[in-house]
Amino acid sequence: MPKKKPQPDKFLKLSWDDINLWAGGKIASRGKSYQRNGHVSKLAITADGALIAWVAGTRRYATRVRMDADDLLESECTCPYALDCKHGVAVVLEYLQQIERNKRIPEVKPDDERIELLEEPEDDDWDDDPDDDEAGITDELRRDIDAFLKGKTKAHLIELIHELADAFPELAQELADRQQLTTGNATALVARLRREIRDIGDVPGWQSHWSDEGFTPDYSGIQTKLETLLKGGHIDDVLSLGRELITVGTEQVGMSDDDGETAMEIGSCMPVIITALDKSSLAAVDKLNWALDVVLGDSYDLCEAFADYLGRKHSKSAWNVLADQLLGRLKGLKSNKSDDGFSWRYERDQLSNWAIHALENAGRKDEIVPLCEVEARTTASYERLVRMLMAEKRHADAESWILEGIQATKERWSGIAANLRSKLQEIRRSQKNWPVVAAMRIEEFVRRPSKNSYRECKKSAEKVKLWTEVRRHLLRYLEKGELPWQQKGWPLPESGIERPGADQRNRFPLIGDLIEIAILEKAPDQVLRWYDQQPKSRYSTSIMDDNSIAAAVETYAPDRAVAIWKRMAESMIAQVKPSAYRGAATYLRKAAKVMSREKKTAEWEMYLQTLRQEHHRKRRLIEILDGLDSKPILKKRR
């Protein structure tokens, strides 16, 4: 039997484009730097043709890279990122460099430590920050400590603890705190913890997406000390400190700009405070009020754990008392004439929501709808009332409140009116009144034309077999501004609510909507027809719109698609920053694919060469452009 020929090495065909598409431009750049700086060692090949190596980072990581059945790259790594990371990129580039230098790559041994590390089950508690490689105490280290301490005398242990306390002041303080709690004197610890809360809360958190730098305050020490106080039975102190923490933390989160990192840190302390509240000697209703005050004062979703606490099972009698208290607070809540009413409405709606929750848990459900009726006219909370009526199958009552709510909110709160109209549509669907449902959908399209609302119109009109006629009227409206139901031959009935007029702010034809619909209907000739009629300023069309347009016409008019993508890329290159260069590469790749399909590769190469000459000083851009021709990396190195 003839010997089977080895398969060609798929890694040798990789281009920079392949690397960037696999890992992303940012990770690919970092991996390139790792490889250049010699971070890859002990490179080897596995029996199934994968690459395996050690890569030095904050620690040493085992990394394996392979190509799947579709010739796509994938990697595994013992770093926190775990998959398709910069270490994987570095391994691939190191392999290509070794091959270029004619170095032999050894086969990995079956008992290689790296294989075992990579095949260990994943830890559910791993840290997903790719730049944070710190590890806790391992089991092996714990065993070493146990072996060291075993057999030590009490005197030796005390001496060792003193040495460690001298070296680590935090340990000394922790031991002193435990001694104070043992003696029942927590005054000093509470006072110091109060100062720590204020000190930590003085500095806002921040994150810079440009430099990947930032600061997040560390509340883990506060959490530990609160837990220590709680274990010592100092429940009232934990609650007092909890109020302080919530006050300080709310102010700090308000000053922070860190994508919620500070709020998460502070939030990690909340379960300790809730446990203290649950164990406290407060009356059941006072516990509910304590948690409710925290929730009502929470502007940053800092205390969601307290809302969960209020969702737990509590005594019916406590809910009954709380319901009466909240109803009393609602009666005493006066409107603030100095603002536009939003803050007052929001505060009142929050109170009434919790009053409803309390009434439900107190078994007083018959009081809920009457309360919602009063509140609907007071705060325009018609949607909540309608939802409840519909849930009780009281559709006639719901419809009556919908019509009142639309009239009351259409001028000042158009979003509420739109949601109420949507609820009326829901009722008409339940009645299977499909012509009216279609009429209501068309009215919503006139109020706010969009691709999605056009799609909904089609769905409804097809149900009554009138889409051809309806479509003609809708397109005429977008082109001429003539309302559909005012055009000759409009086939649908009135909806029963006030029809909208044409928005006077619109300038017809509505070119953007016509282009979107042409794309949706796969009509490239119409896409170009309206695209060419856009205002010359082009301010009204975003880059994303242009990208969609180019994609829609790339088969019908490939030259136009390429021209659009070129212009988009050149606009991004003009921004002179690496992130924009990566964005430009996305559009250049699209254009290159079309040019290749149209057998215009030479013309495309000339265009890239022109870009290189015009921007030869932009080193990062040149690297990206070099990766666009899809030639193997290995050839480029020679």
Image (cartoon, rainbow, N blue to C red):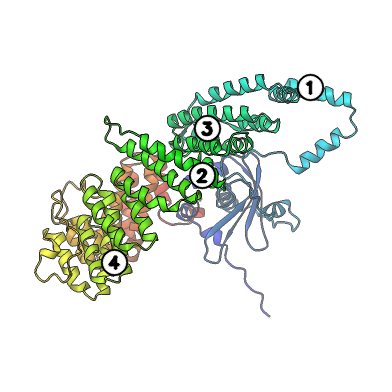
Q: Which residue position holds label 2?
A: 319
Q: Amino acid at mark 2?
A: Trp
How far apart are the two marked residues, 2 and 4, measured between alpha carbons?
A: 38 Å
Q: Earlier in the sequence, mark 4 or mark 3?
A: 3
Q: Nearer the viewer, residue 321 or 473?
A: 321
Q: Earlier in the sequence, mark 3 or mark 1?
A: 1
Q: Which residue position holds label 1?
A: 163
Q: Which residue does the image show at 68% across and 54% down from the upper left?
A: 121
Give residue 428's mark. 4
Q: Position of residue 402 (x, y in %)?
A: 27, 56
Q: Earlier in the sequence, mark 2 or mark 4?
A: 2
Q: Amino acid at mark 1?
A: Glu
Q: Nearer the viewer, residue 410 or 74?
A: 410
Looking at the image, residue 580 sits to the left or right of residue 151; the answer is left
SS of the residue at dot 4?
helix
Q: Which residue position holds label 3?
A: 216
Residue neighbourhood size for the residue with mark 3, other residues' Cα within 10 Å, grouped as few (<14), some (14–19), many (≥20): some
SS of the residue at dot 1?
helix
- Is residue 316 in sight in this rendering? yes
Q: Position of residue 557 (x, y in %)?
A: 24, 64
Query: Which label sits in the foreground, 2 or 4?
Result: 2
